[in-house]
């Protein structure tokens, strides 16, 4: 028998604090060689595109298959030993939660000490998770928000003011956010670079999450070249998907051998934190497995009433 877990039920079983802790441990397991993954692959249909990726973790011995196309978004868990189907769950909430949590983990290890300002460019759905994660990880004194649509920007601020106990302020331009942020998060769907870098502080973490396809771009090659350290959640995935890093390497502003996997930082990484750091997040199946396995454990522990299906 396998369990079916809805998006609403996943919300009851995991929150951002738990997700950050889970991903912190997951990156340590990656560093210890206790995980394997298959980076994202894409298959185009007549109008929509299927995206698939998978990961295995030694303890628990589980395989996760993440697949999504249009609004269909699932994590499927299998027993790594027997191959039995354990659960199929909606990833509509989980995928955004774990993306935010990955930035939270990166900020925990790479952000300037005692940051004053968290800047956000892109006050959309994913931006809510990014702000919540970074506030939990670093406790900035203020969140500065910019988006081209003033009404949407204000709505975001009003909504998030009820979620995190940090003062919010609207920014009038990208330049303003760039110059004032100690941690700058860019969460957009842009195909052209938004931030160029000359106004950044000397001590700053820039985190980008939207450039997860070769055609997408959030920061310029100039910004990347100015960084003391460039970090990503999975190097193999970045080589295929990270539009900004692919362009920077093609333009000889960066070398792939100089891009650090986040797990090396979490597991002990370079001694001393570089002052200007870029974290480029792609979203990887290891993260889906971490949150999915937790949700399944909690569902069983709490004896949540769930639908069951019989394997054929």
Image (tube, rainbow, N blue to C red):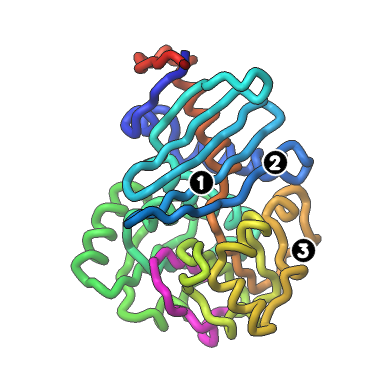
- x and y percent of residue 291 in the render? 52, 35
- x and y percent of residue 213 in the render? 50, 64
Q: Is residue 303 above or below residue 236?
A: above
Determine the residue positioned at 69% across, 78% down.
254
Residue 42 inside the magenta-drawn segment: no
Which residue has dot 1 on it?
A: 52
Q: Identify the secondary structure beneath mark 1.
A: strand
Q: Is residue 88 above or below residue 135?
A: above
Residue 309 falls left or right of residue 252: left
Judged from this view, the residue extending furthest toward the front is 46
The residues colored magenta run 182-201
Q: Nearer the viewer, residue 10 or 84?
A: 84
Q: Residues within 10 Å of mark 2 (few under 14, many from 20)?
A: some
Determine the residue positioned at 72% across, 70% down.
256
Q: Is residue 104 visible?
A: no
Report how far apart the C-alphas of labels 2 and 3 lie in the structure: 29 Å
Q: Nearer the viewer, mark 2 or mark 3?
A: 2
Q: Is residue 164 visible?
A: yes
- x and y percent of residue 236 in the render? 67, 57
- The circle on residue 272 is 3
- The circle on residue 36 is 2
Residue 185 inside the magenta-drawn segment: yes
Toward which corner of the image does residue 233 lie, by quadrant? bottom right
């Amino acid at each position: 028998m396998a369990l079916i877990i809805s998006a609403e039920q996943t919300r009851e079983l995991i929150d951002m604090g738990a997700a950050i802790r889970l991903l912190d441990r997951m990156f340590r397991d990656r560093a210890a060689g206790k995980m394997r993954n298959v980076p994202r692959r894409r298959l185009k249909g007549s109008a929509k595109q299927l995206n698939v990726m998978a990961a295995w973790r030694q303890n628990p011995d589980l395989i996760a298959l993440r697949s999504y196309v249009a609004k269909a978004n699932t994590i499927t868990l299998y027993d790594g030993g027997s191959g039995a189907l354990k659960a199929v769950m909606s990833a509509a909430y989980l995928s955004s939660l774990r993306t935010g949590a990955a930035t939270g983990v990166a900020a925990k290890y790479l952000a300037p000490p005692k940051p004053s300002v968290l800047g956000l460019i892109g006050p959309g759905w994913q931006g809510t998770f990014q702000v919540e994660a970074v506030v939990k990880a670093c406790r900035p004194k203020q969140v500065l928000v910019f988006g081209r649509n003033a009404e949407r920007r204000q709505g975001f601020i009003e909504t998030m003011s009820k979620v995190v106990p940090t003062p919010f302020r609207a920014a009038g331009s990208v330049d303003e956010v760039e110059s004032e942020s100690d941690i700058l998060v860019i969460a957009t769907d842009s195909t052209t670079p938004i931030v160029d870098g000359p106004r950044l502080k000397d001590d700053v973490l820039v985190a980008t999450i939207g450039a997860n396809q070769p055609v997408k771009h959030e920061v310029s090659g100039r910004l990347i070249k100015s960084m003391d350290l460039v970090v990503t959640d999975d190097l193999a995935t970045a080589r295929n998907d990270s539009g900004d890093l692919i362009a920077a390497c093609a333009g000889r502003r960066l070398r792939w051998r100089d891009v650090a996997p986040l797990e090396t930082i979490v597991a002990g990484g370079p001694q001393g934190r570089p002052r200007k750091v870029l974290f480029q997040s792609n979203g990887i199946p290891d993260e889906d497995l971490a949150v999915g396995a937790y949700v399944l454990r909690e569902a069983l522990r709490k004896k949540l009433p769930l639908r069951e299906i019989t394997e054929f």
